[in-house]
Image: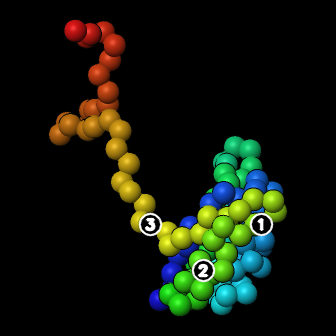
Amino acid sequence: MTTKLYVGNLSYNVRDHDLEQQFAEFGNVTSAKVMMERDSDRSKGFGFVEMSTEQEAQAAIQGLHDQPLNGRNMLVNVARPREESGGGYRSSNGVGGYRSGNNRY
C-alpha cells in the first residue's frame, strides 16, 4: 500500500520531476505532483509524493525534512486526509447560502 507525503515550503520553480528525483533516493516513487495555480500555471509552493511502502516514506521523511531544494528547506510529513470544507448551507428545498446584508440587526 502506498503512503502519501505532503511536501511544503517548495521553491516556486520546483516541478514534478524535481520532487521525483529527490525522493527516488529513498525508494520507489509511485507519483510526484507539485500543485499549480489554475490560472497562472505557477506553483503553489507545495506538493505530494507517493512512496511504495510506509518504510520508504518514513526514510524519505527522515532524510528530506528540513533539507534544501532549490534554496528552500522542504517540510516533509505524512499527508493528512483532505477535510470537508464548510461555507454556506443548503436547505431542504435546495436554496441556501449566506445571509444577505439587508437584514442587519
Kindly identify the residue that appears in the image at 26 percent across and 32 percent down: 95
Kindly identify the residue that appears in the image at 67 percent across and 87 percent down: 26
Is label 1 in contact with label 2 (beta carbons under 8 Å)?
Answer: no
Image location of residue 1, percent across then percent down: 47, 89
Which label sits in the foreground, 1 or 2?
2
Q: CA distance from mark 1 to mark 3?
A: 23 Å
Marks 1 and 2, the one that precedes in the sequence: 2
- The reply to whether residue 15 is in sight is no
- The reply to whether residue 103 is in sight is yes
- Give the residue type that dot 2 points to: Gln
Q: Residues within 10 Å of mark 2 (few under 14, many from 20)?
A: some
Q: CA distance from mark 3 to mark 2?
A: 18 Å
Q: CA distance from mark 1 to mark 2?
A: 15 Å
- Give the residue type that dot 1 points to: Leu
Q: Which image quarter holds the C terminus? A: top left
Q: Is residue 3 left or right of residue 39?
A: left
Kindly identify the residue that appears in the image at 72 percent across and 85 percent down: 24
Marks 3 and 2, the one that precedes in the sequence: 2
Using the rendered view, name the quadrant where residue 74 is placed: bottom right
Image location of residue 3, percent across then percent down: 51, 81
* Nearer to us in this view, 86 or 38: 86
Marks 1 and 3, the one that precedes in the sequence: 1
Residue that label 2 marks: 62
Image location of residue 12, percent across then percent down: 76, 53
Which label sits in the foreground, 3 or 2?
2
Residue that label 1 marks: 69
Q: Residues within 10 Å of mark 1 (few under 14, many from 20)?
A: some
Name the element at disc 1: strand
Name the element at disc 2: helix
Using the rendered view, name the quadrant where residue 87 is placed: top left
Q: Which mark is residue 80?
A: 3
